[in-house]
């Protein structure tokens, strides 16, 4: 069973933020306020065969977004995704975006994204 959206929703709930309330990862592409690019803690979605995937941005460089998510190799982990496959970056509507965002932040210990199952 895909559980990445359940993980993101549970983490948001623990922070006192209302998620989508669904288990469909791509619902997060329509949630919150859209961002033009990555930001630390942003909710990120990507499409894949049969659906989508959702995770939190914990870093990026010119080629990759590094994501903390559930159901990444059937675990909670940090993996890297090519920026070319990302379809949205979102942020909670009622939470101000941090102003001290770096322009590039890489996570050197992340694995390449494999299956999100």
Image: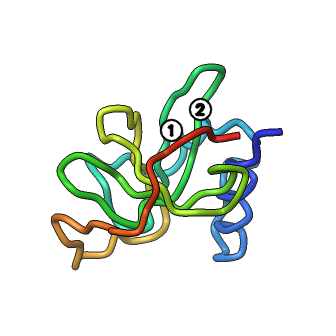
Q: Where does the image place residue 31, in percent across and percent down from the top left?
A: 54, 45
Between 55 and 43, the one lying in front of the other is 55
Name the colour scheme: rainbow
Q: Is residue 11 left or right of residue 54?
A: right
Q: Where does the image place residue 41, in percent across and percent down from the top left?
A: 44, 67
Between 75 and 92, the one lying in front of the other is 75
Mark 2 is surrounded, within 10 Å at the Cα level, by few (under 14), some (14 to 19) or many (20 or more) other residues, namely many
Q: Is residue 111 above or below residue 86?
A: below
Mark 2 or 1, which is nearer the eye?
A: 2
Q: Report helix, strand or loop for mark 2.
A: strand
Residue at left offset 69%, top offset 48%: 5
Q: Is residue 38 above or below residue 23?
A: below
Q: Where does the image place residue 8, in percent across and percent down from the top left?
A: 65, 58
Between 55 and 76, the one lying in front of the other is 76
- Quadrant of the frame with the N terminus: top right
Residue at left offset 63%, top offset 25%: 51
Report which residue position mark 2 lands on. Answer: 52
Between 94 and 14, the one lying in front of the other is 14
Which residue appears farthest toward the right when viewing the image? 1
Residue at left offset 38%, top offset 46%: 34
Residue at left offset 19%, top offset 64%: 104
* Mark 2 and mark 1: Cα distance apart in space: 10 Å
Q: Earlier in the sequence, mark 2 or mark 1?
A: 1
Q: Report helix, strand or loop for mark 1.
A: helix
Which residue appears farthest toward the top when viewing the image? 49
Report which residue position mark 1 lands on. Answer: 29
Q: Are marks 2 and 1 in contact (CB under 8 Å)?
A: yes
Q: Is residue 68 left or right of residue 80?
A: right
Q: Where does the image place residue 35, in percent across and percent down from the top left?
A: 32, 50
Q: Is residue 95 above or below residue 89?
A: below
Mark 1 is surrounded, within 10 Å at the Cα level, by few (under 14), some (14 to 19) or many (20 or more) other residues, namely many
């Amino acid at each position: 069973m895909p559980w990445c959206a359940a993980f993101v929703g549970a983490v948001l709930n623990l922070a006192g933020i209302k998620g989508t309330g669904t288990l469909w990862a791509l619902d997060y592409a329509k949630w919150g306020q859209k961002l033009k690019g990555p930001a630390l803690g942003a909710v990120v979605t990507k499409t894949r065969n049969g659906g989508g995937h959702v995770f939190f941005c914990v870093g990026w460089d010119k080629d990759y977004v590094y994501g903390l998510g559930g159901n990444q190799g059937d675990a909670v982990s940090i993996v890297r995704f090519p920026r070319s496959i990302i379809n949205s970056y979102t942020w909670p509507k009622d939470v101000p975006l941090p102003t001290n965002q770096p322009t590039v932040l890489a996570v050197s210990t992340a694995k390449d994204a494999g299956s999100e199952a």
